[in-house]
């Protein structure tokens, strides 16, 4: 039982970490795009990644975080079912991460179905990470009460 809980914690933490990396990549993308638009950069600046590379990295980290969070949610639900004998899907410990997972599903589906790239998914990733942080803080608060 504790092995499943440990694996659940590791996988969910990996998902949160990957969403944080996605936020950093999105922030760099937005800053770089603004610098290019306003012509506020020098050619010899030495920035290694193009906007295309940043956008591709954003998609990969988002997809990996989405998979890790999905697996973590499944393991958490299985752990709660094994521990309590029933699963309460309205529990904030399941509801908050599920809403975050659905938000990232929305970003991925927009990108895959409409070809949405660049600025809008970057803003969505930054706002999504703010929701991740709020969810994490609320989960920590609920765990201590």
Image (cartoon, grey):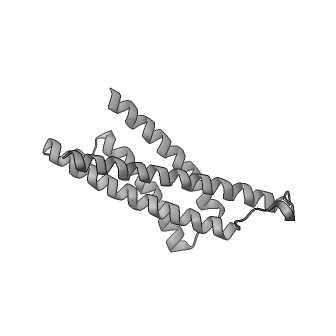
Task: In the displayed orientation, state which residue is furthest to the top.
Answer: 145
For this view, does 45 lie left or right of residue 30?
A: right
State the image quarter where residue 137 is shown: top left
Percent of width and height locating residue 40: 85, 57
For the question of whether residue 77 can be seen, the reply is yes
Q: Position of residue 60 (x, y in %)?
A: 52, 66
Q: Residue at x 57, y 73 (%)?
A: 115
Q: Residue at x 86, y 65 (%)?
A: 43
Q: Depth check: 113 or 64 in front?
A: 64
Please tell me how many numbered marks the rendered image carries: 0
Q: Nearer the viewer, residue 52 or 126?
A: 52
Q: Is residue 139 left or right of residue 42?
A: left
Q: Nearer the viewer, residue 15 or 86?
A: 15
Q: Quadrant of the C terminus?
A: top left
Q: Residue 121: x percent and y percent?
A: 59, 61
Task: Give coordinates of residue 96: x percent, y percent.
Answer: 38, 44
Q: Is residue 56 above or below residue 90?
A: below
**Which residue is nearer to you in this view: 125 or 18?**
18
18 sits left or right of 145 in the view: right
Residue 27 drawn above or below residue 84? below
**View extreme (left): residue:** 85
Side (left or right) of 20 relative to 120: left
Residue at (41%, 48%) from the top-left corner? 13
Q: Can the viewer see residue 100? A: no
């Amino acid at each position: 039982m504790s092995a499943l809980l440990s694996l659940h914690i590791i996988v969910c933490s990996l998902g949160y970490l990957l969403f944080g990396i996605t936020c950093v990549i999105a922030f760099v993308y937005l800053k770089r795009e603004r610098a290019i638009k306003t012509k506020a950069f020098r050619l010899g600046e030495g920035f290694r990644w193009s906007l295309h590379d940043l956008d591709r990295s954003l998609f990969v980290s988002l997809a990996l975080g989405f998979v890790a969070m999905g697996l973590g949610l499944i393991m958490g639900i299985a752990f709660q079912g094994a521990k309590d004998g029933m699963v309460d899907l309205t529990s904030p410990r399941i509801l908050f991460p599920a809403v975050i997972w659905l938000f990232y599903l929305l970003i991925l589906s927009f990108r895959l179905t409409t070809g949405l790239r660049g600025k809008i998914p970057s803003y969505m990733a930054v706002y999504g990470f703010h929701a991740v942080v709020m969810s994490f803080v609320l989960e920590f608060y609920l765990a201590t009460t």
